[in-house]
Image (tube, rainbow, N blue to C red):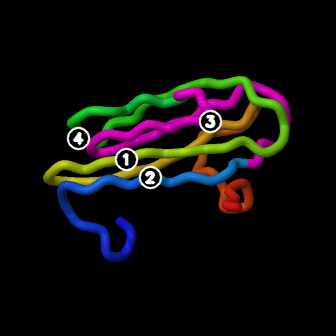
Amino acid sequence: SPVGAAKEKYGLELSGYIRVPKDGVYAFFVSSDDGSRLWLGDELVVDNDGLHGMIVRKGDVALAAGFHPVMVRYFNKTGDRGLIVEWQVPGGKKEAIPDSALFQK
């Protein structure tokens, strides 16, 4: 968890831009304990909300090459915690989103 973050009863909002290398349908995977959601622009792509142990949810979205606003919201109530965000580019494998694809203003 981020430096200074509480171990229980906290939430995070991470936002910026993701650079998509080519047109196509992308899969996004969000694993979390407890709840999380991922948006691209105004579209909710992955909904993994609620109180639960570490589980993964997947969402598919058609994207054009270029930059897209991305936001992840996450919360932990009590107990274990965790957040993992991955993607699968068209024709590729599921993997961590590389730092080179993530930007902030």
Q: Where is residue 19 in the image (x, y as percent from the top left)?
A: 76, 48
Q: Distance between the residues labelled 1 and 2?
A: 7 Å
Query: Label 3 sits on what residue type?
Result: Leu
Q: Mark 3 points at which residue?
A: 40
Kindly indicate whether the residue at mark 2 contacts the one at mark 1 (C-beta within 8 angstroms): yes
Label placed on residue 28: none
Query: Label 1 sits on what residue type?
Result: Tyr
Label placed on residue 53: 4
Q: Is residue 74 above or below residue 45?
A: below
Q: Which segment did they paint magenta?
A: 19-44
Label placed on residue 13: 2
Kindly indicate whether the residue at mark 3 contacts the one at mark 4 (C-beta within 8 angstroms): no
SS for callout 4: loop
Foreground: disc 4 or disc 1: 1
Q: Name the residue under label 1.
A: 74
Query: Label 4 sits on what residue type?
Result: Gly
Residue at x 26%, y 56% (from the top left corner): 10
